[in-house]
Image: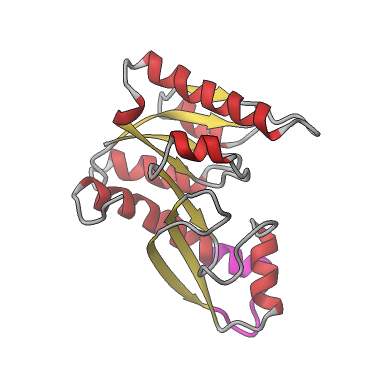
Amino acid sequence: MNFIVLSSSRGTTFQATLDSIADGSLKAACIGLVTDDEDRECIAKAEAAGLPWKVARKVEGEDREVFDKKVDAAIQELLDEVYLDRDDVILAEMGWMWIHLPWFIGEWSGKILNVHPALLPKHGGKGMYGDHVHRAVLDAGERESGITIHIMDEGVDTGQILVQKICTVEPTDTVETLRNKVQALEKEWFPKVLQMIEEGEIEI
């Protein structure tokens, strides 16, 4: 299995995935990285692994159509460099902050994996990303949170759920401590889900 990573974050889950490839627990090939700014820390992870990376810069106030076209073009550049077709890869969104338009989802229908930092359908939808999610979980008095790895569709956090993993929310938890628990699950389970897809245990 070949995959391209989309990330606009530090790339901790990206690094865990690369580590899983290096130690042989994930038998898949990362083709490269697409990010939204040259300052993203995930770029250093790609460079250290010898992987190509492309920037689809998100300009403030820019039309979403323009941005999605940039992302699509960056993906195509990576594919062209290794002589692969779109049918040969999936997209793995790890800390990617942007919602795609329906035409982009249709172009990659059933082939975009996303990890959400809560137990969907709770605490999903527009505006629910990063620490906004953890704050919502704490404000709701939830006893559990976790991750949902799902297929992206035209809705927001509404696609087919592949795996959910749970962590306990303690009364003493803060946004930071809850974030750390959730990110630990992301780093453990995103590579595992990719391997499960590779082995046919999960169909997408």
Residue at 39%, 14% in the rendered image: 81
- Magenta stretch holds residue 173: yes
Q: Position of residue 77 (x, y in %)?
A: 47, 17
Residue at 53%, 48% in the rendered image: 154
Q: Say left or right for 103 vs 125.
A: left
Which of 161 and 1 lies nearest the eye of the viewer?
161
Whether residue 37 appears in this view of the structure is no
Residue at 32%, 54% in the rendered image: 193
Q: Is residue 88 above or below residue 129?
A: above
Region of the chain picked out in magenta, as a range = 169-181
Q: Position of residue 143 (x, y in %)?
A: 56, 84
Whether residue 153 appears in this view of the structure is yes
Residue at 81%, 34% in the rendered image: 61
Q: Is residue 27 above or below residue 37?
A: below
Q: Say left or right for 183 vs 58.
A: left
Q: Position of residue 69 (x, y in %)?
A: 59, 25
Q: Position of residue 38 (x, y in %)?
A: 65, 26
Residue 54: image quadrant is top right
Furthest residue toward right: 61
Q: How many marks?
A: 0
- Magenta stretch holds residue 25: no
Which of 165 and 113 lies nearest the eye of the viewer?
113
Colouring scheme applied when the structure was drawn: secondary structure
Residue 2: image quadrant is top left
Q: Is residue 109 above or below residue 142?
A: above
Q: Quadrant of the N terminus?
A: top left
Residue 3: image quadrant is top left
